[in-house]
């Protein structure tokens, strides 16, 4: 079955420290991979996506993600966390190599501690 | 950047009422729009996919007579929750996809529906 796993319900990071939010996927073929962020009572904001090419994808607000095909992972990273980065982060995959129907992970709540 | 407006942002109504939620793409034409439902502390569940001028495609387990979707123009899709009951209370989010390749989905800010 096609799926996206975010193994951590919550991640706590001190402000200024690097952060990583983990994501692994189980999809046949070469999927599109996404990261979205959701603030309270808001919709999702697009951060970045991987289609092909360079395994390190740079996105909005200083975030980046590294695609690792052998480990089927797409972890989200940022070198120096800000308190304003505190939010709910969703990893998602489009198994059909398209931007339409996508499968979301369950989300990881990121807390940046001042 | 692309903007999707969703209205209303919050609805509280009595059981048995029908509620309409609008999703508009403000600065691009959305060939495809999606409707999601999100339960507290859970991920988004795709309810249906709508393409302009055609019938929506519903995901398994979603009642099409309960959740009516209309995509009459390239900038507007509506979701009507008919005869809403307390179990329909949830956070509903729409997203829109423009024409052309390699476009990410752009999401509205969601509608919190509370049925008393």
Image (spheres, rainbow, N blue to C red):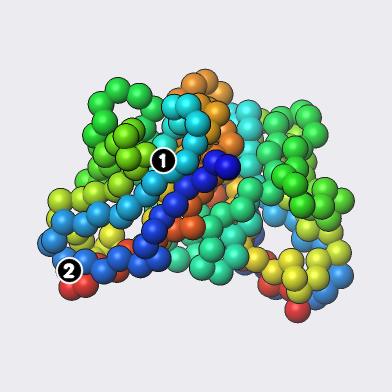
- Contact check, label 1 and label 2, Cβ < 8 Å: no
- Residue at image point 28% right, 60% down: A85
- Check disc 2 and report the residue beneath it: A14
Q: Position of residue A38 (x, y in %)?
A: 43, 57
Examine the rendering and report whether any part of residue B103 can be seen.
no
Q: Nearer the viewer, residue B92 or B74?
A: B92
Expressed as whole percent of the image width and height from the top left, the position of residue A51 reads 39, 27
Residue A61 - label:
none
Residue A83 figure quarter: bottom left
Image quadrant containing the N terminus of chain A: top right
Q: Name the subunit of mark 1.
A: A
Tally of marks:
2
Q: Secondary structure at mark 2?
A: strand
Distance from label 1 to label 2 (Cα)? Answer: 25 Å
Provide residue A111's location: percent of width, then percent of height.
Answer: 29, 68
Task: Check disc 1: other Cα within 10 Å, few if <14, some if 14-19, many if 20+.
Answer: many
Seen from the viewer's position, the closer of residues A6 and B46 is A6
Residue under the point 70% across and 37% down: B50
A66 sits to left or right of A42: left
Q: Earlier in the sequence, mark 1 or mark 2?
A: 2
Residue A34 found in image quarter? top left
Residue topped by disc 1:
A34
Q: Is residue A91 left or right of residue B19?
A: left
Which quadrant holds residue A47? top left
Judged from this view, the residue extending furthest toward the left is A16
Per the image, label 1 sits on a secondary structure element best described as strand
In depth, the one of B84 and B6 nearer the eye is B84
Residue lying at 65% horizontally and 66% vertically, measured from the top left: B90
Chain letter belonging to callout 2 = A
Which residue shows up at 80% across the image and 75% down it?
B14
């Amino acid at each position: 079955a096609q799926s996206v796993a975010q193994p951590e319900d919550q991640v706590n990071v001190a402000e200024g420290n690097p952060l990583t939010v983990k994501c692994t996927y189980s999809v046949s073929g070469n999927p599109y991979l996404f990261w979205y962020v959701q603030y309270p009572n808001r919709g999702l904001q697009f951060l970045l996506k991987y289609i092909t090419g360079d395994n390190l994808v740079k996105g909005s607000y200083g975030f980046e993600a590294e695609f690792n095909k052998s480990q089927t992972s797409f972890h989200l990273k940022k070198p120096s966390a800000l308190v304003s980065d505190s939010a709910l982060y969703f990893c998602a995959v489009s198994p059909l190599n398209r931007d339409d129907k996508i499968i979301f992970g369950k989300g990881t709540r990121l807390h940046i501690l001042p | 950047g692309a903007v999707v407006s969703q209205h209303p942002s919050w609805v509280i109504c009595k059981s048995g009422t029908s509620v309409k939620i609008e999703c508009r793409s403000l600065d691009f034409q959305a060939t495809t729009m999606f409707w999601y439902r999100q339960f507290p502390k859970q991920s988004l569940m795709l309810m249906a996919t709508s393409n302009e001028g055609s019938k929506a495609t519903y995901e398994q387990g979603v009642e099409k007579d309960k959740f009516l979707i209309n995509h009459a123009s390239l900038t507007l899709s509506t979701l009507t929750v008919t005869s809403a009951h307390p179990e329909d209370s949830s956070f509903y989010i729409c997203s829109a996809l423009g024409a052309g390749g390699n476009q990410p989905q752009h999401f509205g800010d969601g509608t919190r529906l509370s049925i008393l």
